[in-house]
Image (spheres, helix red, strand yellow):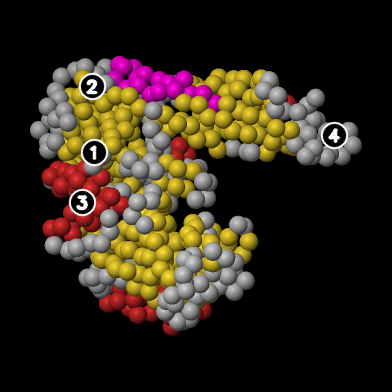
Amino acid sequence: MVTTYAGGRPVNAFIQVFAVPPPGHGNSLIQVWNGTTIDGAARVPMTALLNVARGWIDEGLGGEGAGVEVIATYVNGSTVRYDMKFTTYKPSDALNALSNPVAGIIKLNYGSIKMNLTLTAKKPAGTTAQAPTPPAPAGCWWSLLWSWQTPQVDIPIAWVVDKAPNYLAGSLSAYYNQYTTATVYFYASAGITQGTSAGVTYRFIGYSSQVGAQNWNSLSFGLGQPSGGYLYHVGTLGVAGLRLICITGPTDQYDYEAFVSSIGQNGQLYFSANVSYINGFMSLYKAYTGVHPRYVPFDEIYEGSGHGYAYMFSNIQTYSPPFGFMGTIPIGLIISLTASRLGAQLSAPGLILANLAARLQVSATQISIISISVGHASSYPAYGDLLVAAVPVPYSNPSRSYFYYPYLLGFNVTGLGSYSSGASIYVDGPGVVFNQCAPIFDSYNWTAYVQIGGSPLLVPGGSVEAVIYDSRGSIVWSGSFSVPASFDGSPHEPVVVSVPWTVFNYGVPYNVYYMELTYGGYSTRYGSITYKPSTTTFTIYASFQSCPEHQSLNHE
């Protein structure tokens, strides 16, 4: 079931369904169905996936999560609204459901994909007719211009380069937990552009593949070990280019996508000390963009007096709302490197392809998806810094109208240096507060995520000052809150700003307040990293709710 909405209401949109073929196909996407939603809903028949699903089964991959992309396009006058989203299904379950619907419905997820059509384009004013694939849409559709699937390649889920291999050593681990199994989802990305000179909108568009996280592995580096390496799956990657076409003519709206097509060897996790492979695709970034990849100063490392550095990048509460686990893999660069070695010509602009990444999301909160530790030194005490690679272009979060810089799961361990980074604040909490009719709670809470350089990575310390102003600009409340301090690893946690509910004077329909949050900056213990101050302000509406007689607790 596909449901389509624009501006919060159901709309009748043209639906296109593309399936990801199994490894060895050559193309990375095949259109298998199209149709139009009625009253904002369309049912895609499972038979549309029949031929592709059989291909996966013939390759012995019927139990793998195969990708399906749904694109919805809606025309309202001269405005075109659209969205695209990936999800997965198991080919063996699909065929079982078709042969035995009663038994198949137990295994197969007959789910609903909700499409909020937030992306827009202008419909051409020309009169040149374009012939769509039947059934004809009511105005516009997406044409798959080209697609390409890599052969099996190493897909590094994390890597480390030790810039101080003579005196610092440690390990890089992935998917570790003794008690819980989990699923890791690989999210596809899209770079959407209007023509060649306009800005590019980058976003993640749902998961195209998945793998069990039960195959733990680890890599050692430094002090007699290699100076780095990577942990990887073997699998195939896909890339595609699409163009928005209308009855009145083609538009200059293009969509370039990159995604993980398949994970082979039953999800087995391997390690390699071949740092030249990492350097090979990362060096392409400057060749395509003219700038070097970005590295975010994350933590200071100290070895001595029983101390060692360790940090676990997990799907824990720290990176839950609004981010989830946002570590990414630069698959656009890996696709480019693979294509160049094979002599394949890709029609995607290098600037866009270089910034396309696959996001990792893990299904359970108990598993440590990536862990890095530095526990050995040639002499003590020893000092260093941990830098984390980041994509230096903003990705958009359409559900929250929020932009952020995804970080890559690539780490540099260096000697103690001198780094400076900006900070930004993302706030999650109520926009409207109400008076109480009975004493249920003492305060309203807002969670402030103080981010390093606009990425979802959080600062390791400092404090946040909170000030609330009324509509006249008068201060009605203030408070100071400490960022949980980090030394040699965790916590890197957000700040909870707690405000007594009695601070607000609740009105009809509401009274307006403004909360200003200021992060004062922070320097790490040995002074190698400095995070700059940052300020954000948001609006709070205090609304009066009627209560039974003698039960109103409205603060005057």
Pointer 4 or 1: first along the chain = 1
Q: What residue is pinned by disc 1? A: 292
Q: What residue is pinned by disc 4? A: 551
Q: Amino acid at mark 4?
A: Gln
CA separation, marks 2 and 4? 61 Å
Q: Are marks 2 and 4 in contact (CB under 8 Å)?
A: no
Q: Amino acid at mark 2?
A: Leu
Pointer 2 or 4: first along the chain = 2
Across and down, in percent, residue 224 comes to 10, 33
Q: Are marks 4 and 1 in contact (CB under 8 Å)?
A: no
Disc number for residue 104? none
Who's the residue at 40% across and 60% down the image? 253
Who's the residue at 26% across and 26% down the image? 385
Query: Is label 3 or label 2 in front?
Result: 2
Q: Quadrant where the C terminus lies? A: top right
Query: Is label 2 or label 4 in front?
Result: 2
**Magenta region, residue range:** 517-533
Across and down, in percent, residue 19 comes to 37, 71
Disc number for residue 416? 2
Query: Is label 1 or label 2 in front?
Result: 1
Q: Amino acid at mark 3?
A: Tyr
Q: Are marks 1 and 2 in contact (CB under 8 Å)?
A: no
Pointer 3 or 1: first along the chain = 3
CA separation, marks 4 and 1? 62 Å
Who's the residue at 44% across and 61% down the image? 85
Q: Residue 104 or 351: which is nearer the viewer?
A: 351
Mark 1 Cα shell of 10 Å, populated few (<14), some (14-19), many (≥20) = some
Instruction: State the SS at label 4.
Output: loop
Q: What residue is pinned by disc 3? A: 270
CA separation, marks 3 and 1? 28 Å
Across and down, in percent, residue 315 comes to 42, 43
Instruction: State the SS at label 2.
Output: loop
